[in-house]
Image (cartoon, rainbow, N blue to C red):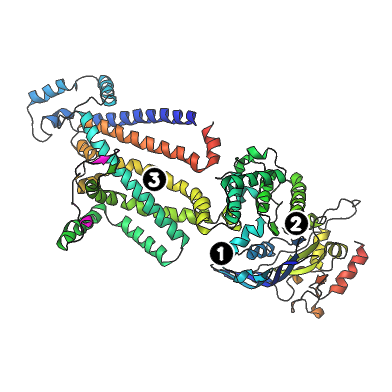
Amino acid sequence: MTTFIVRRLVSLLLTLLGGFTVLFILFFALPGDPAELMAGGGNKNPSPAVVAAIREKFHLNDSVAEQYVRRLGETVTLSGTSYQTKEPVRDVVAERLPNSLRLAVWAIAIEITVGVGFGVLSARRRNSFADYASTLSAVVMSAIPVFVLAYLLKQVTGVYAFQHNWPDALRLPPIGIGPKEWYLGFIPSLEQLKYLIQPAIILASVSTAIVARLTRTTVLEASTMDHVRTARSKGLRDGEVTRRHILRNALIPVVTFLGIDFGTLVGFAVLTETVFDWPGLGSKVARAASTGDLPVVLALSMVVMLVYGLANLIVDVSYAWLDPRIRRNGGAR
Amino acid sequence: MGERLLSIEGLRVGFDTDDGRVQSVRGVDLTIDRGEVVAVVGESGSGKSVTALAVLGLHPKQRTVIEGCIRWHDEDLLAASEDRLREVRGGEIAMVFQDPLTALNPVHTVGRQIIEMVRSHRGGSKQAARDRAIEMLGLVGIPQPTRRVDMYPHEFSGGMRQRAMIAMALSCEPQLVIADEPTTALDVTVQAQVLELLVSSTEQLGSAVLLITHDLGVVAGLADRVSVMYAGRVVERGTIDEVFAAPSHPYTQGLLRSLPRVDADGSDELIPIGGQPPSMLAPPSGCAFHPRCGFAAAESGCADRLPELDADTHGVACWRRAEVAARNAEVGT
């Protein structure tokens, strides 16, 4: 197992290097002179002297190879500075990464509890009212654009709830990061929860629907396996059969999806972050990319790729826990 | 023999499909007394496994129509509550399935799968159940049971897996073990061992065995009585001696003639039964075997009237029993 993890970590590093290189090359290949952008934007005709000074200052006159090496060192040590805001990149990561991780962790928690829960319910009561209701809401949830869903939610909790004197717990602040009160890094205080809950629900909405559908399918499939019939023939309760003999086998595809999804939630939650003004990585990368802010784009992209890679590594390790056959075949080799 | 354990009366099992109802079992009578070994023989699709699963109520409830009576001691299992059925399953009637690789759950250790069964019927501590599991594994001849108990099914050989299945089935000392083609998925070399083990270990515990197989040769030395099934009905039943010495249904004769014999001098050819097994969606009229039967005759009404078993002891469902039986004398079986 250790060999397996080490090998995966090495390949993750190579992936990161490849990603860095592609982004770096793209930056030089795409139109738009970074020096001009920094001097005030491509269409503002900045003075040539200023542009030249900027070129000098940011080493844009060096050869591509020299720039590549310098940029790589700068990105790895997080020692760059934003072209746009002059903030150290390290500060940007330190502020944004925890916000993104917290939001993503809670969104994943919702996907697991609600998605898997409804998926199992649907499968066990196949073709019942509960199944149709859960299927329908899954389709609706994944079909409505995120910002529309967010707007509707905010209308209910932020406007309607106040107008009709709903209990405090249902009157929620429409946007913002909140008081930043976290226990053990990830557990929000009650006040913090009010700020977290809405973006977490919205961020989780589409994936929860997918998880529910996926779980329903895999549970139904796992239910037809021979060993499930054996389990029933042993006189186990339905709940025991589902928990011990169906779910474990049904969860592998769901776990795969959750692993990929976690990376996406951390890095690409742009819409949710924007709608709720939640200062995460995604919205920052999007803005930095549109303004040609290379140090920020590179550093944040690397962070996102790293999270993505680690999440998938955890998924692969969890396969071994879910299925002992993988432990021997994939792990020890 | 002893007291009557199970008596199946007029059992009919049908499955509703998109193409109409498949009537897999069309009126089966079968009895098993305490400590007896009864074999049910028939080809794929003859309804023998469907009958076995019906005894424990293991068919999916939707789309399955079961009629008749399954009398276990003095109660009708078809009318029993789900809670009562759970007590019976594994506790009073246990099953051994065909393919131990798929019938055991790959993600749990063999021990755990025995332990959960023992605990659900007998309660008690985990340790006590574990001791029982080890004891049972030892009883079925698995070497180093204390070590094997913590291994996964894929770490066992095929024969060992089926031994573990048998250990599991016997762990709660059931009064009846239903073995559904217990050796079909095994290497020929271990088939005899496993069957021997099944019969000897059940004998030790005083359990009766309902042995379901397509191989008439398998049952010769092991069973007390045999029922031959064809197209969802019993076509011949009797003691092993009666059926082997004087097979009186053309299908039984066909089965015996298609068996290789150790004592033959090589002059006896194996004679396959011509034609195809019938579709249970639309079984042939009259005697279901008549399209494949060399004795079928229009004046006997083979194609028009459904024959019933004609006797309680050596019963045969054939309109031309006398002619068929006479053939035994001719060929000197």
Q: Chain of mark 1?
A: B
Residue to which mark 3 is pinned: A258
* Secondary structure that dominates the magenta span: loop
Residue B58: in sight, yes or no?
A: no
Residue to which mark 1 is pinned: B83
Q: Nearer the viewer, residue B224 or A135?
A: B224
Percent position of residue B130, x then y? 61, 45
A82 magenta-colored: no
Q: Is residue A204 left or right of residue B225?
A: left
Label 2 residue SS: loop
- Residue at 60% x, 61% y is B87
The 10 Å Cα crowd at callout 3, few under 14, some 14 to 19, many 20 or more, is: many
The 10 Å Cα crowd at callout 2, few under 14, some 14 to 19, many 20 or more, is: some
Q: CA distance from mark 3 to mark 2?
A: 51 Å
Q: Which residues are magenta?
A: A166-185
- Residue at 66% x, 53% y is B169
Residue A227: in sight, yes or no?
A: yes
Q: Chain of mark 2?
A: B
Q: Which mark is residue B206?
A: 2
Q: Quadrant of the image for the N terminus of chain B?
A: bottom right
Q: CA distance from mark 1 to mark 2?
A: 25 Å
Percent position of residue B92, x then y? 66, 60
Are dots 3 and 2 on a single chain?
A: no
Name which of mark 1 and mark 2 comes first in the sequence: 1
Q: Are marks 1 and 3 in contact (CB under 8 Å)?
A: no
Give the vertical position of B100 relative to A35 (above or below).
below
